[in-house]
Image: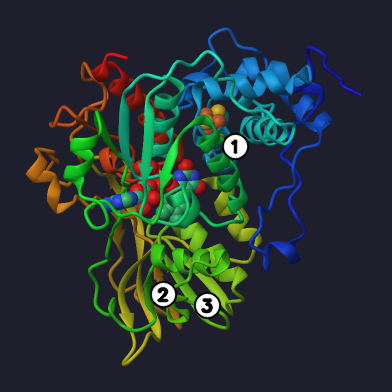
Amino acid sequence: TILNNDFQFRDVARMDPTKKAMQFRTEDFVEIYEPFEPTEASHQAHRCLECGNPYCEWKCPVHNYIPNWLKLISEGNIMEAAELCHQTNSLPEVCGRVCPQDRLCEGACTLNDGFGAVTIGNVEKYITDTAFAMGWRPDLSQRVWTDKKVAIIGAGPAGLATADILVRNGVKAVVFDKYPEIGGLLTFGIPEFKLEKRVMEQRREIFEAMGIEFRLNTEVGKDVDFQSLVDDYDAVFLGMGTYTYMKGGFPGEDLPGVFDALPYLVSNVNRRLGFEKSAADFVDMRGQRVVVLGGGDTAMDCNRTAIRQSAESVSCVYRRDEANMPGSRREVANAKEEGVNFLFNRQPIEVVGTDKVEGVKFITTQLGEPDHNGRRRPEPIPGSEEIVPADSVLIAFGFRPSPQPWFAEYGIETDEGGLIKAPADAEIAFQTTNPKVFAGGDMVRGSDLVVTAIAEGRKAGQGILDYLEV
Ligand code: FAD
Ligand code: SF4
């Protein structure tokens, strides 16, 4: 039965899909949420108040038509809802799973005022998963191919979104990536308990059927010259991400047993997907006392991967308090449920050990004045040092840009921090200082979110269409 009454927001409580039983969650690399049943999705969607000027839409970086597709789902109209989702978003099935909704669409929902926000992300996932299973594919029957073609470097969300816009407008898109599968960090960073790998495989099939060509296992600058792309294509888009790992700069960081977060996560994906080149590349936390340093999404993914690898204990140490953690609140709560022990207001000052890690020395902090970003600065309290024993340490302090040596040769300017200069608000959006070259995603804005990379990729795609006068 479908309730559908005007006071549904009051009569039906906000609900997320059921989570899998804990015994599976701490062992299996599968998504932890069960799918919504059709009636659950409809009931949740109908809680929407259909605000005249919806805040949720404004706060969503791709400005999804949220109330409109919620209405379609409350009426059971899956195919139209899926079509509408794709008008603004190139990867709605991914965003529904991994966006930090509490900071974006759901955080802006009017119903936060005591009733509980509409469950937007999980309905977006429900719409796309169900529509794909029912055979939905984009309707490109009106498309007319032009004679233009664009090379895209990077099959992460930024590059994929650009390719989506281009092929829908009749411009051939050829995407180069050094990895053996598309997705960038969606495949080789974010673990399967948040985003199962079949999701990107399915998306590759959809994109290929739309006419996007992927050249995988192909590194530009090594297997293919950048010059050949400049010569053979009408424009080039760079969506290469940020891959310089931030360090703590304290003693002991080079001891055996200290690992950077991303290579650790990638080694786990490579083993699970059969892409591992050598068994020695796999980092196994079985039986280890693991300390994870950092408080963002990457740290949460390390925590929960180590739990699933049967670590003896996992402690996550963050230098501010819980309220100031950058990671999604949902994922912090999931990590806690799965057994991660959090130590807040602790700043690492040394990894201790003689020939390998034996522990991490911390100093307790208190929050002081806000810094230039408005976040309160952690200040060490003298005399509060302590050592937490550890066998392995994972460093998840974030990423800095990784500009390529050949950028300068092609007149592609970066700022002093290494981010590519490609302004969103220029006359031609996301054009670099080389007019034929465009860029977007993490390498332009700094490491951020999937949905912001998609938003930039889509706008850059429009910028390329403007440049090509298509
Ligand atoms: P990337 O996804 O990094 O893709 C860049 C691609 O370029 C890669 O595939 C790379 O192989 C390719 N490439 C680079 N150089 C070359 C070259 N020379 N030749 C060929 N290919 C090249 N965001 C969220 O919204 N929610 C989350 O839950 C979340 N969790 C995260 C967890 C982890 C562990 C990490 C690291 C990030 C997470 N993020 C999350 C952030 C999000 O994944 C990124 O912001 C987003 O993927 C950036 O997209 P991008 O397209 O700019 O770059
Ligand atoms: Fe919310 Fe992200 Fe979907 Fe936008 S794309 S509606 S922010 S889940």
Pinpoint residue 310: horizontal percent, then vertical percent.
Answer: 61, 76
| Observer able to see residue 156 | no
Q: Residue at x 26, y 51 (%)?
A: 220
> Picture coordinates of residue 41 (x, y %)?
76, 30
The disc, 3 or 1, on the residue closer to the chain's N-terminal end is: 1
For this view, does 378 lie left or right of residue 23?
Answer: left
Return the x and y of residue 276 as percentages of the image width and height.
48, 71
Q: Residues within 10 Å of mark 3 (few under 14, many from 20)?
A: many
Q: Amino acid at mark 3?
A: Met
Q: Work out whether 431 lies above or below 286.
A: above
**Residue 4 placement, left or right of 307:** right
Question: How far apart are the alpha carbons under marks 1 and 2?
Answer: 33 Å
In this picture, residue 82 sits left or right of residue 180: right
As rendered, which of 345 and 144 lies closer to the eye? 144
Residue matched to label 3: 285
Element class at badge 2: strand
Residue 338 seen in this snapshot:
yes
To which residue does mark 1 refer? 93
In depth, the one of 287 and 69 nearer the eye is 69
Q: Is residue 457 above or below residue 329?
A: above
Residue 200 drawn at (x, y percent): 55, 46
Q: What residue lies at 54% left-to-right and 72% top-to-bottom?
A: 314
CA separation, marks 2 and 3? Answer: 10 Å
Dot 2 or dot 3, earlier in sequence: 3
The amino acid type of the residue labelled 1 equals Glu
Label 1 sits on a secondary structure element that is: helix
- Provide the residue designation for mark 2: 393
Other residues around mark 2 within 10 Å, as few (<14) / some (14–19) / many (≥20): many
1 vs 2, front mark: 1
State whether label 3 is within 8 Å of ligand 1. Answer: no
